Amino acid sequence: MTALVHAPGAPCWFELASDDQPAVEAFYCALFGWTVERTPMPDASAYTIFKLNGLDVAGTYSLVPGALPGPDGNTASHWGVYFRAADCDAIAARAVALGGQMIAAPFELMEHVRMAVCADPEGVVFSLAQQRAHPGVDAIGVDNAVCWAELATRDIARAEAYYQRLFGWRMQAHPHAPTGYRVFVDEQRMLGGLLQMQPDWGDLPPHWSIYVQVPDVDLYVERALALGGQLAFAPFDATGVARIARLNDPTGAGFYVIHFVDEAGR
């Protein structure tokens, strides 16, 4: 099967850093029907690739003391987003030159990928992946796979300018999303969005999130709670687009589940 080709700047990998790797493996496999493929790492830990019908959908690894921060700047369990970089070193340098930070300078992760970890001007952490042997996710935008990456930001204009200059994103409005919502796209599809945080979000830091597409949001929320997850935002309808809920897995890592009304909603 031909691997999915990710355009430069597109979200290409989704990764869970967990403080209880066995627990989250069991949770996500039971919730989404994922299976696992474990690869031994040089430090004697194991990196787990989650698979859906034999296709790579995400990864997870165990947090260790001194671990890199997550998308909200903390080192608790969290989901992270990788963006494809044709030249990891050049994009990482640009990320800093545009006002961001270098969290982990470019390095080779065995034969799989050349990667770097950066933070945008708001301090939101994201990763870069120059793909080597591993091409990134093979399944995206189908039921039980990630379909969307979203930045919740306190300053959407600054965030849009930063990421557009960093990755060359083409940006557009979404006809059914909240006022000011911005979508980044490539030639084939919408890739993700930028959401302006409101005062009622309280002191929650800006952050990247993932959305997993499901056939029935309410059913999956019920299933997640039975498996030890927690409800962060109860299911709600985004009129004309989708039904959405936000969950935390048993270790506290947050993610969204979403069911689209129709293909026009994306």
Image (cartoon, rainbow, N blue to C red):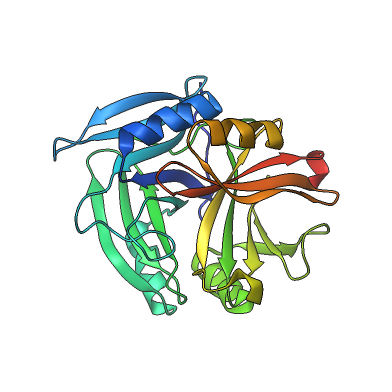
Q: Where is residue 81 in the image (x, y as percent from the top left)?
A: 46, 52
Residue at 68% over, 64% down: 171
As drawn, is 199 to the left or to the right of 7? right
**Image: 259 above or below 168:** above
Q: In this view, does 224 lie above or below 265?
A: above
78 relative position to 68: left or right:
right
Q: Can residue 187 be seen in this view?
A: no
How many numbered dots are placed on residues in this image? 0
In which quadrant of the rendered view does residue 198 lie?
bottom right
Tell me what residue is drawn at x 62 percent, y 74 percent.
156
Say above or below: 97 vs 45: below
Which residue is farthest left?
Answer: 43
State the residue in front, 255 or 97.
255
Measured as percent of width and height from the top left, residue 7 is found at 54, 48
User: Is residue 36 visible in the rendered structure shown here?
Assistant: yes
Query: At which x and y percent is residue 241?
Result: 80, 48
x 45%, y 77%: residue: 121
Residue 180 quadrant: bottom right
Residue drawn at the location 26% of the way across and 29% of the way down:
39
Asked if residue 177 lies left or right of residue 149, the reply is right
Q: Is residue 182 left or right of residue 2?
A: right
Farthest residue, direction right: 240
Q: Position of residue 27 (x, y in %)?
A: 45, 31
Residue 135 lies in quadrant: top left
Q: Nearer the viewer, residue 52 or 202?
A: 202
